[in-house]
Image (cartoon, rainbow, N blue to C red):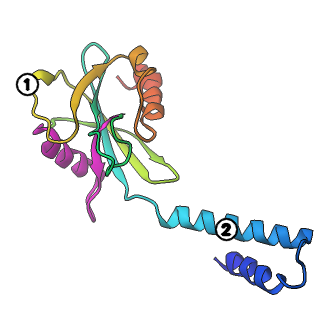
Amino acid sequence: MGLGRDAFYLFFRSRQILKNNYIFRIALSLSYNLRVRYNRLAMREPPGSDIILLNSQQQVLLVLRDNKTSIPFPNTWALLGGYLEENEPPEVTIRRELLEEMELELGEIKFFKSYVWEECDEHIFWTQIDLDICNTKLHEGQKLAYFSREEIEHLDFASNYHEIIAEFFDSLAKII
């Protein structure tokens, strides 16, 4: 933050003296870039925990998010999951979220990978399960659907899910 204050100081002190000067424009640019970077870090979302549910046909179960303007990424496809509550481990989060969202109690789940994105941290788990989605209650989202790797290429995804699922499919032979 010290560099940000220095840039602001330079900006305001040199404003009268260096108008239309190259140094003035550099100071202004530096000041703006530091403020943008700080705001992005300060406005990060809480960490999340998601799960890849893979059926016996090597298809991934996704949820179509609600079409509400009040939520991020409305009407896009996503993995099931949610935000960690205070002091909650990621595995506990994913189990809680699936109970809340679709009344599903998971058996064994495996950790896949953690991601650090600019907007949040994401912990990804996976398991193999064949669900009858026609008889599954869904409390969040519009609907559930299974998709193959080829079908996933044509979907509109929330957040970074496309990248996560692609990496999962790329490593599938090693983890099964």
- Provide residue 19's location: percent of width, then percent of height: 88, 76
Magenta residues, as a range? 77-105
What residue would you read off at disc 2?
A: 34
In the rendered structure, the answer to whether residue 114 lies left or right of residue 143 reads right
Q: What element carries label 1?
A: helix
Instruction: Find residue 54 and report its image quarter.
Output: top left
- Provide residue 20's location: percent of width, then percent of height: 90, 71
Amino acid type, mark 2: Leu
What residue would you read off at disc 1?
A: 135
Instruction: Find residue 113 and report its image quarter.
Output: top left
Task: Give yes or no for residue 89 being in the magenta stretch.
Answer: yes
Task: Give yes or no for residue 150 being in the magenta stretch.
Answer: no
What residue is shown at x 41% (from left), y 25% (from top)?
Answer: 155
- Provide residue 40's location: percent of width, then percent of height: 54, 61
- Provide residue 158's location: percent of width, then percent of height: 40, 38
Q: What element carries label 2?
A: helix
Instruction: Find residue 28 and report its image quarter.
Output: bottom right
In the rendered structure, the answer to whether residue 124 lies left or right of residue 24 reads left
What residue is shown at x 47% (from left), y 29% (from top)?
Answer: 167
Residue 39 visible in the current orientation: yes
Circle 1 packing at 10 Å, graded few (<14), some (14-19), many (20+), is few
Figure check: 114 above or below 132: below
Figure check: 22 above or below 1: above
